[in-house]
Image (cartoon, grey):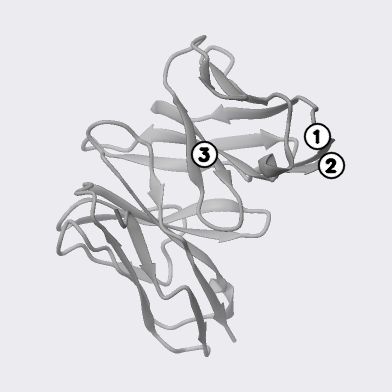
């Protein structure tokens, strides 16, 4: 059974702190790993990673994938209250006939307090 | 640019009633999917489609039907609603050929009483 496990499930930090969110996976037919941010409504896309060791960056957020050890981390530096959200990790798996499925972890709820 | 549009945003059903959740996208994406999100469970795949006329089951398909007659639309039907189907439902679409980034609709909050 394909599994995506995120840790911690929740985290409370102060503004300005740096946080690291973890995502490990045990899947067959790996295609890519994606990170999403979910505030009150729909998840919004952050990063897609397909190759090990290549860091993706967007402002204060960065992410890296380790395909040998089967995990990814999402780093947020100098956190702000606007970073408060649930961060979702998903793995895209090949599912035959050129299609794929996304399997999500349960998410990490990040709360940033002033 | 509408992206992925879901209707309705909220719905209350009585046990045994049927209804259709609508999903439309205007990005000409081949791949569309339906997820449900329950507290502490993350997003779970219900059904997906890789193109018009092609659908397949995801992780939790029981109690739901789908069809894909056009590229743009992917409705989700609840045949006989049950309280266990109380959830938030998200529709998503992506460009299957290029990458796996999924664009999500704003969700439908369904309560079955």
Q: Chain of mark 3?
A: A
Q: Classify B55 as above or below B6.
A: above
The residue that mark 3 highlights is A1
The residue that mark 1 highlights is A15
Q: Residues within 10 Å of mark 2 (few under 14, many from 20)?
A: few
Q: Residues within 10 Å of mark 1 (few under 14, many from 20)?
A: some
Asked if both marks, 2 and 1, belong to the same chain, the answer given is: yes
Q: Classify B113 as above or below B103.
A: below
Residue A76: give x, y in percent of width and height: 67, 27
Q: Chain of mark 2?
A: A
Q: Nearer the viewer, mark 2 or mark 3?
A: 2
On screen, residue B3 versus residue A86, left or right, reads: left
Residue B51: give x, y in percent of width and height: 18, 50
Kindly indicate the quadrant of the structure image that contains residue A17: top right
On screen, residue A14 versus residue A37, left or right, reads: right
Dot 2: element: loop
Asked if both marks, 2 and 3, belong to the same chain, the answer given is: yes
Give the quarter of the figure containing the C terminus of chain A: top right
The residue that mark 2 highlights is A114
Asked if the residue under mark 1 is in contact with the one under mark 2, i.e. CB atoms within 8 Å, the reply is: yes
Decide if residue B85 is in sight here. Answer: yes
Dot 1: element: loop
Residue B109: give x, y in percent of width and height: 53, 71
């Amino acid at each position: 059974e394909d599994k995506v496990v995120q840790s911690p499930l929740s985290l409370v930090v102060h503004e300005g702190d740096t946080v690291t969110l973890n995502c490990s996976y045990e899947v067959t037919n790996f295609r890519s790993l994606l990170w999403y941010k979910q505030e009150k409504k729909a998840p919004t896309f952050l990063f897609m990673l397909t190759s090990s060791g290549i860091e993706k960056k967007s402002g204060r957020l960065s992410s890296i994938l380790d395909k040998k050890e089967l995990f990814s981390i999402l780093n947020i530096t100098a956190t702000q209250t606007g970073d408060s959200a649930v961060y979702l990790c998903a793995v895209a798996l090949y599912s035959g006939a050129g299609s794929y499925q996304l399997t999500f972890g349960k998410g990490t709820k990040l709360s940033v307090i002033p | 640019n509408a992206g992925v549009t879901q209707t309705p945003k909220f719905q209350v059903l009585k046990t045994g009633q049927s209804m259709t959740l609508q999903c439309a996208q205007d990005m000409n994406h081949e791949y569309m999917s339906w997820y449900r999100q329950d507290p502490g469970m993350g997003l779970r795949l219900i059904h997906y489609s890789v193109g018009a006329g092609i659908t397949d089951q995801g992780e939790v398909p029981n109690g739901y039907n789908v069809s894909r007659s056009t590229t743009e639309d992917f409705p989700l039907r609840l045949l006989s609603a049950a309280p266990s189907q109380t959830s938030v439902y998200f529709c998503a679409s992506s460009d299957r050929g290029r990458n796996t980034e999924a664009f999500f609709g704003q969700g439908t909050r369904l309560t079955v009483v």
